[in-house]
Image (tube, helix red, strand yellow):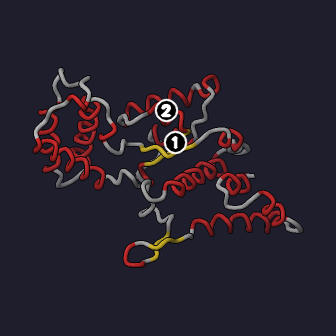
Amino acid sequence: YHFVGYIIVTRLRKLSEIIKLSKGKSKVDFNKDLTDIIKGELKRTKKVEDNKVQQIYDLDAINYEDDRVECQNLLLLLNVQYFLNNSSNNKFPFDLYKSEFWSVEHINPQNPKDFKTVGQIVKWLASFKNYYTKHQEESNNIVEEITDLLEILDHPENINRKLSELRISKDTNEKLQLVTEKITNDLELHGIANLALLDRSTNSKLGNNIFIDKRKVVLDLYYSAKEKGVFIPECTKDVFTKNFSKE
């Protein structure tokens, strides 16, 4: 059920091809053929710089900007495998999955360029200042740079001000761009570790908010899923509740 469902919704094979593949086979042999199809997809490669060949699904290399469809397929497989490993007789609800349009959501927001107010940028910068202070060695420079930016931006009259109305110096603007770039690179915000599977409607509700604000929306929808008619995948819920350990 799970492997057939996954192969169909990711369009690795047509249903007619799977039926043909199953003819005259034991369940064990058919199951092996299905897993081989999925393994074959996970081994797919592409050419990168200097004509080098790279595995698309390499966890250190796959990213939102270049491999969005593959990121979605991988996150779906994670959720399907969750049901195989942890949910006894429960089955992944492919009917709910098929009834929605899906997208890949950044757990930590990817870039403040999409923020609408200065207050959103301030919260974004403050959250990463907190992260660097706690978790990163030799991060004094960026902590100082973020602190400088917060001193300029974090004022009551700025909180609800539209970005288009903000007037900052060229130097401050350049510093904001450099800090944004450094955060994106350091924390690999486009990498698979910062991505989760969500339907487009829920994704649009989360917008570009910081983690703690997204978490509140996701959990509210998850625990009232039936009445609100949404489907929050289990692994998406787990990442927002921090159920996954560092290991």
**Residue at the spot of label 1:** 236
- Helix, strand or loop at label 1? It is helix
Mark positioned earlier in the residue sequence (2 or 1): 2
Q: At label 2, which amino acid type do we have?
A: Val
Write down the quadrant of residue 31 in the picture.
bottom right
**Residue at the spot of label 2:** 218
Q: At label 1, which amino acid type do we have?
A: Thr
Question: Can you give x and y, in whole percent of width and height, for residue 222 in the image?
Answer: 55, 31
- Helix, strand or loop at label 2? It is helix
Q: Are marks 2 and 1 in contact (CB under 8 Å)?
A: yes
Q: Is 57 located above or below residue 132 in the figure?
A: below
Q: Is 21 located above or below residue 152 in the figure?
A: below
Label of residue 180 in the image? none
Q: How many marks?
A: 2
Observer-nearest of 238 and 95: 95
Q: Viewed as shown, does residue 214 lie left or right of 153?
A: right
Question: Can you give x and y, in whole percent of width and height, for residue 221 in the image?
Answer: 54, 28
Name which residue lies at 61% across and 66% down: 41
Q: Cα distance, mark 2 to mark 1?
A: 8 Å
Name which residue lies at 53% across and 58% down: 70
Observer-nearest of 192 and 68: 68
